[in-house]
Amino acid sequence: MVALAHNAFLVIRTVESFEPQYIGYAAAEQRCDYHNRIVSDIKSGNKEVEKYWKTFFLNEELKKDRKLAEKKAKLAANGFGLGEGGLVGCSILAECFCPLLPNPCYTLFVLIFCAVGKLINLITKI
């Protein structure tokens, strides 16, 4: 994927490819000149510039992979199951609205809720 992004970057672009109708012609022209200068440097053999941009695209790919891994880990840690209305996982609201879902988090919530309720009842009676 990094090679594809880097290779797509190495194309000389026109001002129109920067959509001047949205950012203005002067801004599009600036961006086009900047981009084309970098591409020309890389194609002429400037190894420092080439290394910088390859590293840039590699870092961007790593960020995407890291975000995806974090998202997957977060979903796995939430203990998602099936539920009505999207109230799933270890959610306090899920126990209130979906008490029949077989999830140990719900059972734990009920036990804690009942224990706290009994404690409050004892305190108010004293």
Image (cartoon, grey):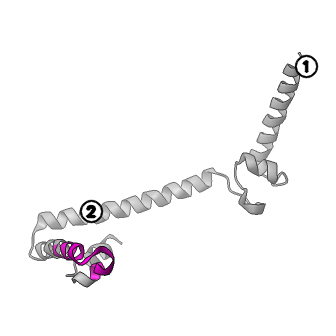
Q: Say which residue label 2 marks.
A: 56
Q: Is residue 4 left or right of residue 122?
A: left
> Residue 75's x, y, as percent?
60, 56
Residue at horizontal 80%, vertical 30%? Answer: 116
Which quadrant does the C terminus fall into? top right
Residue type for callout 1: Lys
Q: Main secondary structure of the magenta part?
A: helix
Residue at horizontal 11%, vertical 72%? Answer: 41
Q: Secondary structure at mark 1?
A: helix
Q: Residue 11 versus residue 73: which sits nearer the camera?
A: 11
> Residue 38's x, y, as percent?
16, 71
Instruction: Tell me the mark number nearer the camera, choosing from 2 and 1.
Output: 1
> Residue 108's x, y, as percent?
77, 40
Q: Residues within 10 Å of mark 2 (few under 14, many from 20)?
A: some
Q: Is residue 84 left or right of residue 26?
A: right
Q: Residue 33 versus residue 7: which sits nearer the camera?
A: 33
Q: Say which residue label 1 marks.
A: 125
Residue at horizontal 17%, vertical 68%? Answer: 50
Which quadrant does the N terminus fall into? bottom left
Q: Is residue 32 within the magenta segment?
A: yes
Residue type for callout 2: Phe
Disc 2 to disc 1, how far (Cα)?
A: 66 Å
